[in-house]
Image (spheres, rainbow, N blue to C red):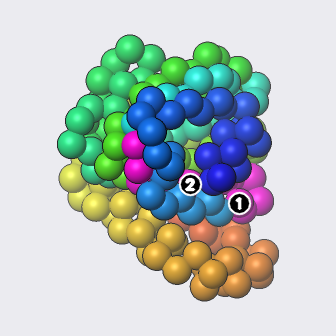
Amino acid sequence: EPIDDLCDANGIVARLLRPGRPYADLVAIDLNAVSFYRGRCATDVALRGQWQQGSLAVAAIELTERPVTVMGQRFDQGSIMQFEGGAEFDAVVPQGAIWTLLLLRSSTCCADLRRLLPGVPRELSSDCRDRLFQMARDLTVSPSATASRLRARREADAVERDLVESFAAA
């Protein structure tokens, strides 16, 4: 199941809160120092655990009818959140929510994003939100085309840089 690929590899455990499959769709793209995920929940999913020490995760909610609950706080669509690796993580993502997640493993990428994203969590600015989610859709609309494009190291570096900049600008 896709849920294992997302969770087990990153130290997060998922539990279904209602019967069904966890995701209607899930695309994962591993670059050099960054992993990018975009998914839509097919049922309510609870996530617990902790990402690797020294990593940084940034999540943005593209669409949701009900709030996403993270660490006891409620977030509506258009919100962005940042999580330090090594800290406990606890979230409930409702059915139908579309989200993007950027997981940074490089200390350089992490430092850049920490510097550029003070005060997260917060709401995304509208222009940058549109750019971020359009980039996410473009990367994930045809995963096989994206995968073949990213095999070239320079292209992977460029996409990684664009992703970090898009999240930071948002």
Q: Is residue 9 above or below residue 169?
A: above
Secondary structure state at the residue bearing disc 2: strand
Report crowding for label 2: few under 14, some 14 to 19, many 20 or more residues within 10 A (C-alpha): some
Marker disc for residue 30: 1
Q: Looking at the rendering, which quadrant does residue 145 occupy?
A: bottom right
Asked whether residue 61 appears in the rendered view, the answer is no
Q: Distance between the residues labelled 1 and 2?
A: 9 Å
Q: Give the range drawn in magenta.
A: 30-43
Amino acid type, callout 1: Asp
Residue in view at x 65 percent, y 52 percent: 1
Percent across and percent down for residue 165 are 50, 56
Which residue is more in the foreground, 104 or 161? 104
| Badge count | 2
- Residues tagged 1 and 2 counted as in contact (Cβ below 8 A): no
Q: Is the magenta stretch mostly helix, strand or loop?
A: strand
Percent across and percent down for residue 164 are 55, 54
Percent across and percent down for residue 111 are 64, 37
Asked whether residue 58 appears in the rendered view, the answer is yes
92 relative to 153 in the view: left or right? left
Determine which residue is flagged by label 2. 37
